[in-house]
């Protein structure tokens, strides 16, 4: 199969996946709660039969399920996800407001974890069974075993309350006005507004939550990189490269590292889901105004339309990220396209 | 496992937590709900080894009682997810065709929802509580087990002993339950052991977010949530966190060693 046909197939498969997600959120929102009316309207309004009838009619709840799904899809296609019970704004507007903060945080955490875990996994494999290897293995196990919300609290206590190194939680310091929103990413917007001081402040605020959030993926990716690297180091072509008399670093970096990155790339895509789960608790701890905080407030307020919107968006992001990873993979490794 | 001192220590730690959970009523110096308002927020002392919380409850006692909840909940979530995964993945592998296709596409979809988000959706629909938290973990995790089980069934059913059973006239159901299923169990058990720690961690996250048991119940995640606003009383949040870390870490080390032991293909890695 050619590269382009592979890509075409993957993109075509995207459509049924996205429809599937809407079906799943639909079933959860319309079939799971004993009474969606109470869930949407809250106990007070659901005492009034007229309100209930009007609500049922507006959302088509008085019609058969397949038809309801059609209405749900139609509303969704027009960007209508309903109105949030707690913020009284359309869910779509809320999501647009909160999404950039989460993408900023998740990207920073992902970059941090790649910068740490890929070299660490490589070193750990090359210096197998040394002190460094043992420390890296135990460290990555601790990374996957630490509750992120607890680590966040400990980090705030140590670096903010005691040492005073970290700024107060939030995206910017109180006295600094946020830059005019263009992209929604504060760091980017500050640079666009030529306010490097604001960008620096935003980066200082981003550092600690990103480090905390990255702890889990650092553990996962380091373990994977080490394992993959060890496997590749045992291959014939690495032995050939060594026998040719190439310097150790050349063998490790040019021959072994490149090939061992292939399975690691998939794990990075898959660990993105864990990162998004982690973002929910990290954002709650660090008062980070992203999708995770929004999801948390919606869930505790039983804000059903809002939480369904978050579920839909997060699942779509996860699928898109993994599609990008698979495509990147197909470019790197010709063997994938054959399968 | 016997050759690895780290694995032995971890196994000992898991066992110790098991004992602590079982005999918490004997070991705990105080009742987990007993409030000693006069000594609220007191630092670790001879009377309260790990200090007291904002309501004057003994942190150590609450941690010990917390193990009675976390360990069974983690195990139950994994057993339920594993059971559902084995049933559906097994059905997919055996029956093939449209059943296989349907079940596998559903697993693809479910895997797109991060656990915590899915749990929030379920909680928003059904309400917070221990049962719904376990249900959420089960709903989020069965697809991984289903995929593994399906792959194993497809591999095992090609083997000679299955062919032999078929030639001897065993029914399809008998082959499935008596011959193929038992041969697929050990990788599932390994995944399960690795996941118990992960399930305990996830349950604690859900309680931290207020999606678990009500706040008075001694549970590690909600104890940490209660200590959040007391930055100077570090002991309230620190010790339950260390409890989670030690137990989950121990489970992960044991699971890793078990995998190395039972799966020789991975041993060299």
Image: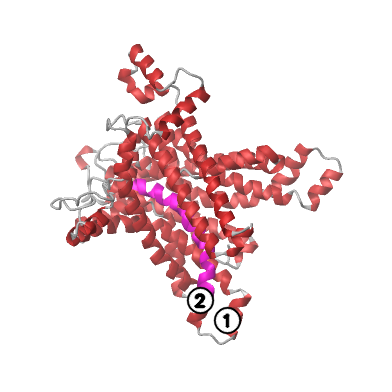
Q: Is residue B175 left or right of residue A314?
A: right
Q: Quick check: B137 left or right of B92?
A: left
The image quadrant of residue B205 is top left
Can you name the residue that lies furthest to the left here? A175
Secondary structure at badge 2 equals helix
Residue at the spot 60% in from the left edge and 85% down from the top edge: A243
Residue A181 shows which numbered tag? none
The dominant secondary structure in magenta is helix
Pointer 2 with pointer 1, Cβ within 8 A: yes
State the residue in front, A120 or B57.
Answer: A120
Query: For the residue labelled by badge 1, is the local secondary structure a helix, a strand or a loop?
Result: helix
- Asked whether A103 or B241 is in front, the reply is A103
* Residue that appears at 36% across and 56% down: A107
Tell me the residue that label 1 is attached to. Answer: A241
Distance between the alpha carbons at the discs numbered 2 and 1: 10 Å
Classify the position of the N terminus of chain B by image quarter: bottom right
> Which residue is identified by label 2?
A254
Task: Tell me what residue is drawn at x 25 percent, y 50 percent.
Answer: A182
* Callout 2: chain: A
**For the C terminus of chain B, which image quadrant?**
bottom right
Look at the image and say whether residue B101 sits in the magenta stretch.
no
Please report, as a chain letter, where disc 1 is located: A
Range of the magenta residues?
A: A253-281
* Up-down relation of residue B238 to residue A232 (above or below): above
Residue B149 seen in render: yes
The relative height of residue B268 versus residue B110 in the rendered view (above or below) is: below
Measured as percent of width and height from the top left, residue B103 is found at 61, 39
């Amino acid at each position: 199969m050619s590269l382009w046909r592979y890509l075409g197939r993957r993109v075509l498969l995207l459509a049924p996946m996205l429809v599937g997600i809407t079906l799943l959120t639909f079933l959860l929102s319309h079939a799971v709660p004993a009474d969606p009316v109470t869930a949407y309207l809250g106990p007070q309004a659901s005492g009034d039969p007229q309100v209930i009838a009007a609500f049922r009619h507006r959302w088509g709840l008085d019609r058969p399920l397949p038809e309801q799904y059609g209405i749900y899809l139609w509303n969704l296609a027009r960007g209508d996800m309903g109105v949030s019970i707690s913020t009284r704004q359309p869910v779509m507007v809320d999501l647009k407001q909160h999404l950039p903060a989460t993408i900023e945080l998740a990207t920073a955490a992902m970059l941090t974890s790649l910068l740490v875990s890929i070299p660490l996994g490589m070193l750990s494999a090359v210096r197998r069974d040394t002190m460094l290897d043992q420390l890296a293995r135990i460290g990555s196990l601790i990374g996957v075993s630490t509750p992120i919300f607890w680590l966040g609290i400990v980090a705030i206590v140590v670096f903010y309350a005691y040492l005073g190194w970290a700024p107060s939680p939030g995206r910017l310091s109180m006295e600094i006005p946020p830059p005019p929103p263009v992209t929604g990413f504060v760091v980017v917007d500050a640079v666009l507004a030529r306010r490097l001081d604001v960008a620096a402040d935003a980066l200082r605020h981003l550092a600690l939550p990103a480090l905390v959030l990255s702890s889990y993926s650092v553990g996962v990716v380091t373990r994977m990189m080490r394992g993959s690297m060890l496997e590749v180091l045992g291959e014939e072509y690495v032995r050939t490269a060594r026998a040719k008399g190439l310097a150790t670093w050349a063998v490790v970096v040019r021959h072994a590292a490149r090939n061992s990155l292939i399975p690691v790339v998939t794990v990075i895509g898959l660990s993105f889901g864990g990162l998004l789960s982690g973002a929910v608790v990290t954002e709650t701890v660090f008062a980070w105004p992203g999708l995770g905080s929004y999801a948390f407030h919606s869930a505790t307020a039983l804000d059903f339309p809002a939480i369904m919107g978050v579920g839909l968006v997060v699942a779509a992001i996860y699928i898109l990220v993994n599609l990008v990873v698979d495509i990147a993979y197909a470019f790197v490794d010709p063997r994938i396209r054959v399968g | 496992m016997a050759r690895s001192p780290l694995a032995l220590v971890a196994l000992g730690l898991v066992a110790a937590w098991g004992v602590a959970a079982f005999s918490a009523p004997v070991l705990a110096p105080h009742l987990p709900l007993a409030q000693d308002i006069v000594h609220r927020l007191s630092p670790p002392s001879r009377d309260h080894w790990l200090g007291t919380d904002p309501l004057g409850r003994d942190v150590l006692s609450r941690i010990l009682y917390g193990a009675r909840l976390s360990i069974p909940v983690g195990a139950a979530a994994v057993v339920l997810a594993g059971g559902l995964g084995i049933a559906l993945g097994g059905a997919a592998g055996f029956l093939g065709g449209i059943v296989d296709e349907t079940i596998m596409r559903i697993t693809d979809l479910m895997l797109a929802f991060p656990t915590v988000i899915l749990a929030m959706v379920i909680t928003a629909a059904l309400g917070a509580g221990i049962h719904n938290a376990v249900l959420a973990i089960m709903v989020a995790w069965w697809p991984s087990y289903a995929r593994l089980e399906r792959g194993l069934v497809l591999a095992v059913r090609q083997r000679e002993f299955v062919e032999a059973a078929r030639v001897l006239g065993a029914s399809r159901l008998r082959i499935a339950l008596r011959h193929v299923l038992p041969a697929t169990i050990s990788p599932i058990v390994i995944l399960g052991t690795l996941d118990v720690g992960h399930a305990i961690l996830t349950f604690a996250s859900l309680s931290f977010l207020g999606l678990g048991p009500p706040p008075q119940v001694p549970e590690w995640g909600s104890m940490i949530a209660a200590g959040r606003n007391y930055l100077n009383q570090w002991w309230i949040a620190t010790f339950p966190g260390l409890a989670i870390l030690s137990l989950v870490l121990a489970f992960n080390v044991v699971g890793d060693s078990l995998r190395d032991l039972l799966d020789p293909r991975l041993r060299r890695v």
